[in-house]
Amino acid sequence: MSNNSPIGFLDSGVGGLTVVKEAMKQLPNETVYYVGDTLRCPYGPRPVEQIKQFTWEMTQYLLKKNVKMIVFACNTATAVALEDIKKTLRIPVVGVINPGARAALKLTNNNKIGVIGTVGTINSGEYVNAIHKKSPKTDVYGVACPKFVPIVESKEYESVIAESVVNEALATFNGKNVDTLVMGCTHYPLLKPLIKKEMGEHVQLIDSGAEAVSEVSMLLDYYNIAADAIDEEKQHEFFMTGSKKMFEDISLDWLNLESISVNKIMLP
Amino acid sequence: MSNNSPIGFLDSGVGGLTVVKEAMKQLPNETVYYVGDTLRCPYGPRPVEQIKQFTWEMTQYLLKKNVKMIVFACNTATAVALEDIKKTLRIPVVGVINPGARAALKLTNNNKIGVIGTVGTINSGEYVNAIHKKSPKTDVYGVACPKFVPIVESKEYESVIAESVVNEALATFNGKNVDTLVMGCTHYPLLKPLIKKEMGEHVQLIDSGAEAVSEVSMLLDYYNIAADAIDEEKQHEFFMTGSKKMFEDISLDWLNLESISVNKIMLP
């Protein structure tokens, strides 16, 4: 059995591309359809009901494209909207928080885990819940980093400003002795070199989005819905509510895709 | 929702303990029931129909104990019997081959993957199938290592003989340039220091059993059947068809469990 329909990815902006990059590496047979709500990004500081509404609109958009699975490539959307939406859909839905939490429990040796994310993600407490559900005695320190997403979306992720913003935010972990840090926002891997530098070599960084791809890969096996190997070029499609240009620049820089099909769309 | 029933593990012998060790680390709330067919171990060289029959007997034994999930903590049983048995059961069944294959695709950079396993596992071609299903252009080199399981089961895994047996078997990989090696038998992690030494630091070793625990962890989330956190000591239970003494020695050495409940059983 197999299923050559695309896998749908949704994100508030460009962060989900870090998930797509990993999906293209691990699952080269699969076709990617991606919706990025760049017009209304960032989601992190928005009210919960609004995040739910926007996420629902992206989900509907992907369902109309006949995707076989949907990946919430956005921690904020996962924290706020995944459970409700998952219940209403017949296809598998994957978030990024449980995979990030599982990977942290796998890697930590001292049971002290740090989590960085948007205000929405950290305030939801979903990482703490996910980790404590499996391992109640593990210490989890969550820190909201509201300045990180705007830096990435404005393509300043290698700037001097970025470095000082990262250093200031992560100073909160001084003395906490975490040995594992979950990058609980799919935008953050673009800041990974700066985060690594500030946290030090002894701290293992977890890319929640990359971990989610392991779950996608597992569900393809579990439901027997992996795509067949075909020789033709995959027709990946990217749908953006905001500027195509900005998205094309970042995807070229980040995905090394020479030409991608980016479509401007309206939601809802 | 939660479910405090035990998770069942089955293996031809003691190798599955490497999976249990990882499960106890990542999933401290869960209770482990383990069946090891130490009397009829090794399975690797046996005819396919016999492996299917023995695996079915272990599965039945665990089902009668009301486990909520079954883990084939044995590559040979996974290669030969998983698909058939999975179809007949209503609870989730996890094997070790797909998780090992997925982890290899995640870690490899040069798309050259080595796999070592029993004759049964390597001859089944299931690792090659699992990897090529996802990534057809990846090179996979499988090598059967029939002497490894007897060395582990006889507790000689740190001996001089073990070192020469490992070196001889892995010499097959000379010139193959693999950057990732799947230990495609749950007994092999007990030989990991020797395997690492022979393959070199640049080759990443994958423990198929440890990777399977990630799948278990994921399915607990997916079906909402993780156990609650309870303060009392977990009542793990181990059921052996062969010598209790040998099993107790290895589990003490490997799991660092001071006292475990080992029961001698008859199959079928």
Image (cartoon, coloured by chain):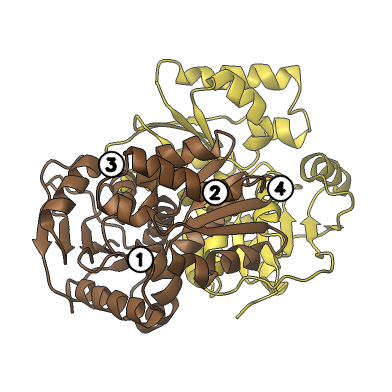
Chain colours: A brown, B yellow
Tell me which amino acid carries mark 1: Phe
> Of residues B135 and B43, which is closer to you in this image?
B135
Across and down, in percent, residue A196 comes to 48, 38
Give the CA separation, mark 2 to mark 1: 21 Å
Taking the image as shown, residue B16 lies to the left or right of residue B179, namely right
Label 2 – label 3 distance at C-alpha: 34 Å
Tag on residue A72?
Answer: 1
* Residue at mark 3 to residue at mark 4: CA–CA distance: 32 Å
Q: Say if residue B38 shows up in the picture.
A: yes
Q: Which residue is mark 2?
A: A181
* Alpha-carbon span between mark 2 and mark 4: 29 Å
| Residue of label 3 | B136
Secondary element under disc 1, as helix, strand or loop, is: strand
**B245 with respect to A252 (left or right):** right
Q: Amino acid at mark 4?
A: Leu
Disc number placed over residue B17 in the picture, else none: 4
Q: Amino acid at mark 3?
A: Pro
- Say which element carries label 4: helix
